[in-house]
Amino acid sequence: MESPLRSALWRRAPPPVRQRIVAAKSSRGWRAFLNLADCVRVDTRSLAVFRIVVALLILADLLLRSRNFSFYYTDDGVVPQSLAMVHAGENAFSVYYWTSDPTLIAALFVVQALFAIQLLVGYKTRIAMAVSFLLVVSLDHHNPLVLSYADTLFRLLLFWAIFLPLGERWSIDALHRDRAPRWTFVGAASALALAQMVTMYAQNGYHKYNDDSELWQSGGATPKIFGLDEMTFLLGDYFRHIPTMLEYGGLTWYYMLIASPLLILLWGRPRMLLTFMFVGGHASFALTVRIGAFAYVAIAGLILFLQPQFWRDAATLVRAANLQDHVETAGNGVERVGRRIASVLPSVVFDSSRQQLARAIGYKAAIVIVAGSMVLLTLSAGVQFAGVADDSVGPTDEIQEYQDRFGVEQPEWSIFAPTPRTTDRYYVFPARTADGEMYDVFNDRELTYDRPYDELQKQHDAYRERFYMNSIRRAGDDGAAPEYLVEHICETWADERGVELTQVNVYEVIERIDRDSIDDPDERERHYFLRSMHGCDGHEPEDFAPPD
């Protein structure tokens, strides 16, 4: 006689799951049902939400980048195409390299937005996903000086998403099909997409584990990170006054990173709980630390870990809150709009068995080739990561070229690791005018090396400017990027102020943060570093030394 619990689980199980249980019991017993495939099985509703979030992220990124369109993305700005191609690499793919006309570049922005909208509604979803991936890669390579880990993770997730059935539910494609949608999907693509997130977390946790200062293991890392005025904002300025809470929060995040493989090994409510913990961590980052879109991209990737149990529990909560009628009304309204759109858009379906077979073979061949290449590269990175220097183990030149071309190489994922950054920084650009006046042209003020703002993150108009300034700082006197920036400053200053600049230098000011100076920047020890010197319009460079 079956237990009430087993009977209840049987009633709640979707039909495909019931079929698998029956097949398993009749063939090889219950053990056949509990296999690794279930660990990488993705709910098609989660795939639909992932698709929608990804499309919205592409649109939001385009809107945010368009604020600095001329400055960052045309030859009239600080990153002309020639400079972008040098930093992106000789094999980098970008449709933006086909033109330098600002109007055509703006048109490509619009084209990318249109494909993102196509992805959003799920029309010819796989094509929309593949083209969106290529356009995202193209835009990243169009200006590699403003990129961060968020862009790398986003490219990798988009790459794996090409092989996922993102249009199975809640899409125009689903309305065009004459079959019921699948409940779940499992395959190499789902395994690799989930493994991407776990690889990032586990590798970052490993880096933090190898921190010689043991700040992560002791909980002392997070309070110091929240002392970085250049990065913290919103709630971060308040949480820094509660160091004990930050210590426990940092320790919790550290152990979550170490335990991140459980995101795949667990299933049901335990996986849902761990996934929500990671989502909560990223949500707290979005409200406290200005690190760009990383939190939102990571949350998008975590959506893939939500299994059928989440959707059953969500439906239970909706019924308990008496919101079922409202949800059904909203859903029916969205479906009516979708059907109207679907009736206008043409549907091209491969109906014959021969066409379907060819399509299936092509898809499987592509996923085998791609998955094999990426696994080889991941294993190679793992060998290097473990400190084993062996030139015989690694990707072929062709695979490495493929990775570089489309920006899908795996980085070290050393975010705030191994040793967290414990220095604040800001920039001063001392400059002399033709009539002998001295200015800090970066912060638009008379020359002083003091802090430009109490909250240093206000020094950057957009979050990508901080990543751009990191590129300028690292380039120093040996790179062309600072030359283009200073040349742009010299030209615009003369046009806007009616007086020419003769020299401009780039200084980085470092503030050492300790426990006592987290809330009191005036007590911090400052160091001044000259990164590069420049002359405007043929003048010789000259250093303007800061105070002792």
Image (tube, rainbow, N blue to C red):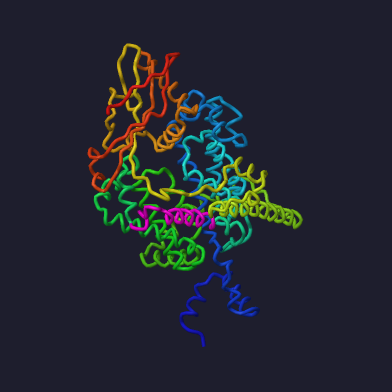
Estimate the x, y position of residue 30 in percent, counting from the top left.
58, 78
For this rendering, which residue is in front, 151 or 345? 151
Estimate the x, y position of residue 251 in percent, counting from the top left.
35, 58
For this rendering, which residue is in front, 242 or 342? 242
In this rendering, position of residue 94 left or right of residue 154 = right
Residue interval drawn in magenta: 194-218
Residue 340 in sight here:
no
Whether residue 344 is in magenta: the answer is no
Question: Main structural element of the magenta stretch: helix, strand or loop?
Answer: helix
Is residue 191 placed above or below 14 in the rendered structure?
Answer: above
Residue at the spot x=54%, y=33% of the render? 87
Residue at the spot x=52%, y=47% of the render? 411
Residue at the spot x=56%, y=73% of the render? 34
- Asked where in the image residue 317 lies, by quadrant, the reply is bottom left
Quadrant in the picture for the C terminus? top left
For this rendering, which residue is in front, 9 or 135? 135
Residue 486 in sight here:
yes
Estimate the x, y position of residue 480 in percent, counting from the top left.
50, 27
Give the number of callouts.
0
Q: Residue furthest right?
A: 354
Is residue 482 placed above or below 132 in the rendered structure?
Answer: above
Q: Residue furthest bottom?
A: 1
Whether residue 200 is in magenta: the answer is yes
Q: Residue furthest top?
A: 435
Estimate the x, y position of residue 482 in percent, counting from the top left.
45, 27
Is residue 49 placed above or below 147 in the rendered structure?
Answer: below
In this rendering, position of residue 493 left or right of residue 343 = left
Residue at the spot x=44%, y=21% of the render? 487
